[in-house]
Image: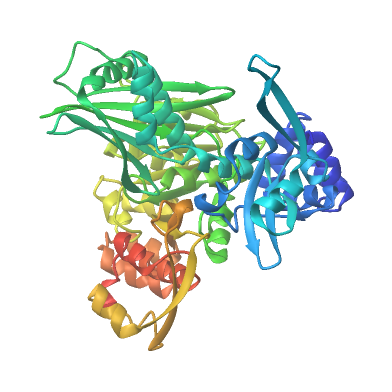
Amino acid sequence: MDPKEILNLLVNTQYITSEDSKLALSSTNDDPAIAIDYLVQNNIITYDIIGQALAESWGVAYFDLNTFIPSKDDVIKIPESVAKELRLVYFKDLPEKIQIASDNPVVLQGNAKLIIKREEKSGFIGGKKEITEEKDLEQELIKLFQKPIEFGYSLTQDIDRSLLSYKAPLSSRFISIMDKFDTVAPEIVEEIIEEALEESVSDIHFEPQYNKSVRIRFRVDGILQEVGSIPFAYYENILNLIKVNSQLRTDEHFIPQDGAIRFQKNNSVTDVRVSILPTVYGEKIALRVLTNSLSNITLDTLGLNEKNIKILRKASQKPFGMVLVTGPTGSGKSTTLYSILKTVNDEGRNITTIEDPVEYKIEGVNHIQVNKETDLSFARGLRSILRQDPNIILVGEIRDDETAQIAINAALTGHLLFSTVHANDGESTLPRLLNMDIDPFLLSTTLQLIVAQRLVRKICPACVYTYSVNRNELEETVGESLERFFPEEKLTLYRGKGCANCGFTGYKGRSGIYQLIEMSEELRELVLHKPNSDIIAKISRKQGSLSLFEDGIEKVKIGVTTLDEVMRVAQIPEEYN
């Protein structure tokens, strides 16, 4: 069904109003496909609602492959050729039937046939002829599973993801490529990047080892995991290929080099940041995969609770001032800022960003890339932006005194400014800024909100289960008193068993944990006296601000993540020790 038909279906089934449809089309130059993304981004519908509407149109049930994710072992029970040709995914084994998901109209209408070809001997001289048989798909599946079959609809992107279960492990594919091709560099690099995109990998590491092999590791949900290795004999060609494509020197092996590659496959384009670093065993490559799509990222999907979403929306609607997001590298600061930008992006505002690098691109926003070769720094770029009649400015990072001074003045002169600062938590952000020689009065006048954040891995929805534990047992494990956070002696918590869907880690995807500090009159007065972080923490707590650890504990209690994950990225506030 094409996007225009889907929009009409959503209106006819009353999942959206005709006004919603008209607004989405008018906001996207009458492009139905982009209009559907617009409806999702603005929380008018969800992809699951689209799936439900399409299922109803076919007269079948909706099988949500995001809520219940079948294991790889279950998926491959259907022969690969049949599954891929007819778009079939094993969904559930119920006592009375087997449920199979598909987005193929012929399957959903019950008219699908299996075409089976075989060879038979022909004539007296031992010739062969090809015999083609046509068999009913449902009856063949009943024979296979010895149970009745129920077909249901699943979204195309979910079917595509599930069909990846038939792919061999990356290490096996390396061997196949090396056996098949004389020059393996392009094939192996392409295979690695494609796999990384399919698995939502943020970083790819090529690491030369002492034993003359090169280890390949992926960072998934913030954790590195080995996915294969390559003999060192093949690595030089791979290294040179990446250097050439990222416009780096191939004759230089003893200094760090940085570049970028644009990877294009079919209609998809992905930017990859390249870093080369010499080690004692050879040159190490680190590739950062930069996601250009923000279609599924909103304030509601980041892990913020309802109270914090309201605080962020309120701060982002102010005509001027400064909102700062703080946390270490890789804690999701840019994603949070861009989610806020999406809420304020309209024709009536001039929004300009200066970043290093530009990780996301939003239509209607002016993006500027820091460039050392042309001396385009954050400070210099920010000065130029102020001459471009901006309403809203995003500065990728306040990393020096000069940028801090210009940012404060921009926020003071009628601009709304978003930026990031490296600090351990919300309360240490103010002393960090004051150490940049910012005038305390100007800081107290302009700063509106501080958002501190970390990322924790989410429990895999396919293998999550509950378990009972005594609080004393948890305290022995973490070495801290937890009574303040878990008053009950007996607790029911959540974790993942580990399955094919999550690579047997028990985790799939990530969520943020947050600490928001609003600048109250009491805090503004306090800034004038250059307070330390302990005093700021006490006042913000009195105002109702939760620490990173406390917000994490709330997510532990509702089954989003585990205590181990929260302890990995956040500390218990000192006053509770």
Residue 326: percent from the left, percent from the top? 37, 51
What is the tally of numbered marks visible in this picture?
Answer: 0
Q: Residue at x 27, y 68 (%)?
A: 534
Q: Residue furthest right?
A: 12
Instruction: Name the side, left or right, on which 113 lies relative to 575.
Output: right
Residue 90: percent from the left, percent from the top? 62, 51
Vertically, is 483 above or below 302? Answer: below
Residue 479: percent from the left, percent from the top? 22, 76
Residue 141: percent from the left, percent from the top? 69, 49
Q: Determine if residue 288 is in view.
A: yes
Instruction: Name the side, left or right, on which 9 lies relative to 88.
Output: right
Pick the front one: 473 or 316: 473
Vertically, is 281 above or below 524? Answer: above
Q: Quadrant of the C terminus?
A: bottom left
Q: Residue furthest bottom?
A: 489
Pick the front one: 21 or 283: 283
* Res 259 → quadrant: top left
Pick the front one: 573 or 394: 573
Vertically, is 361 above or below 11? Answer: above
* Colour scheme of the picture: rainbow
